[in-house]
Image (spheres, rainbow, N blue to C red):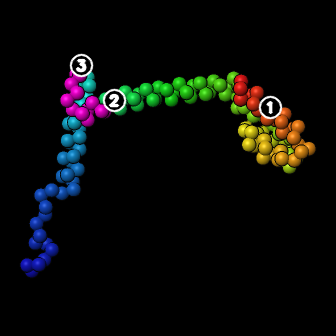
Amino acid sequence: MADSDNSRTLPAVTRRRLLSASAAWLAAQMRSAEATLAGDATDNSDPVLFLWRQWMTAHDEAERLCELQQRLESRMISEIGFPRVVVTGGDREDPVSAFSMDEIDELLGDRPERAEAREQARAALAEQQRR
């Protein structure tokens, strides 16, 4: 019975204790950081806290610029729409929208009899993109 698994003593540090201690330590660190940020502390002695502040400032600016870009994009699409041309006369019977020069070339191919239609479609798309 000396080799029995039941006679083993449990370690002092268990997974549950480690997780609860880690959670308590993180909570204390967050409270300390929040208290420092709430005051007018300009102490940069803690390099991690200093970097975290810089990251938060950059993140806030990135978020602001992202929202601005989305508003401008939405406004541009509602006022102008997506630059596109409707291509007819290709290998397909129905008209197809093309959003790039490559799509125009793909739809109309390089046949000489479609050269004029291809150039007109490319010119119309270039005009819309310029607007």
Please provide percent x and percent y for residue 94: 85, 44
Specify which label sits upstream in the sequence, 3 or 2: 3
The secondary structure type at the circle numbered 3 is: loop
How far apart are the two marked residues, 2 and 1, measured between alpha carbons?
47 Å
Asked whether 109 or 64 is in front, the reply is 109
> Mark 1 = which residue?
123
Residue visible at 22% across and 22% down? 41
Give the secondary structure at mark 1: helix
**Residue on which the image places disc 3:** 40
Residue furthest left in the image: 2
Q: Residue furthest right?
A: 113
Numbered label tally: 3
Query: What kind of residue is marked 1?
Result: Ala
Image x and y of residue 103, in percent: 75, 43
Drawn side of residue 16 relative to residue 92, left or right: left
- State the residue lying farthest toward the front: 112
Q: Which residues are magenta?
A: 41-52
Q: Is residue 16 above or below residue 53?
A: below
